[in-house]
Image: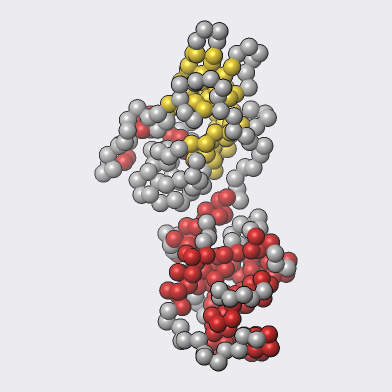
Amino acid sequence: MFSRTANLCLLALALAAAPPAAADQDCTAAGIAASRSAFQAAYDAKSYDEAESIIDPLWRECIDGKQAGRELAASVTNDFALVAHRTGDDEMCLGLLADYAPARTRNNDAMAGLSPRLQQAIRFNFKQCRAYCLDNPLDAMCEDIRVEEQLDHLVVGDFREAPCPFDAGGSPSLALPSAVGTAACLAFLPPLADAFELDDPESADPAQVCPRPILARKGADAVVTDELSLPRTSFLRNARLCCGDLKLAIDGSGLIEVTPADNPPEDCLSGHRTDVLQDLFVLHGTDLVLTHRLSEAEQ
């Protein structure tokens, strides 16, 4: 979720008031080493404003967008983020570290190439600055961070898409394990109503505005369908979340995964993408029984 373009825009705003970089910043190996040594001395002396005045031009002139080595670039960026935290600018700290996606426990390419010690330092500093989002939950960067954290909680199993081999009468569809000689599929019919009044969303009836699950069975001569019931806590029963396209998958045990095709999906009212969604079901007769729900959205 963290794009470099978005992060640079955030940093440009955060750094706009900072003094211009020194014209004589030395970006040779020796010059970078000297600046880092001076930064460390100021930081160790708790002269954080001085430390920031040293690392700011170093980062701007020698690191940001330049051909610096991966370990060096990450280390200087992490130092800059740490001193931003010390000077009270946790927003800037998060923006500096965001490209390393430290909100996730699974490494991205940028983090995976770093030494374990530096990875640990980046994660530690990120957690210190994460407090900014407690007071600014609607900040776009904080929403992205929350999505990254949610992605770590997705149940990752041996799920596979298996479209119905016959016309089940709805879309999307999923082939289900069935008795010998009887093909069965889960499918979704379109909503009964095209939309609901945006000025009165609370009055929206999920049974009218959300896709309707059916169980389709193909016999010798015809396809027979039964409506399936959904638990109220499923996102498929939430009028704000059920309007997007769905993705269906199943594992070897028959566990059914339902997720938005775009995850997190757009809120049907606000258009914001704030929650990763994943519902896991088992089918009992004509009931889809929810066994796992990944969503912080209010129901």
Locate residue 195 relative to residue 210 in the image: left or right: left
Q: Nearer the viewer, residue 287 or 12?
A: 12
Q: How is the image coloured?
A: secondary structure
User: Residue 177 location, x and y as percent?
Assistant: 63, 22
Q: What residue appears at the point 47 percent right and 17 percent down from the top-left corner? A: 226
Asked if residue 38 can be seen in this view, the reply is yes
Q: Is residue 285 shown above or below 209?
A: above
Q: Name the quadrant of the C terminus.
A: top left
Quarter of the image where one finds residue 163: top right
Specify the farthest residue to the top: 221
Q: Which residue lies furthest to the bottom in this view?
A: 24
Q: In which quarter of the image is residue 294?
A: top right
- Count the labels in the image: 0
The residue under the point 58% across, 76% down is 66
Left/right placement of residue 173 relative to residue 34 reads: left
Q: Nearer the viewer, residue 294 or 73?
A: 73
Specify whether 111 is left or right of 81: right
Q: Where is residue 81 in the image (x, y as percent from the top left)?
A: 57, 74
- Expressed as whole percent of the image width and height from the top left, the position of residue 152 reads 61, 51
Query: At which x and y percent is residue 216?
Result: 51, 18
Residue 30 vertical placement versus 108 (above, below)? below
Q: Quadrant of residue 97?
A: bottom right
Residue 39 seen: no
Q: Residue at x 56, y 51 (%)?
A: 150
Q: Nearer the viewer, residue 120 or 225?
A: 225
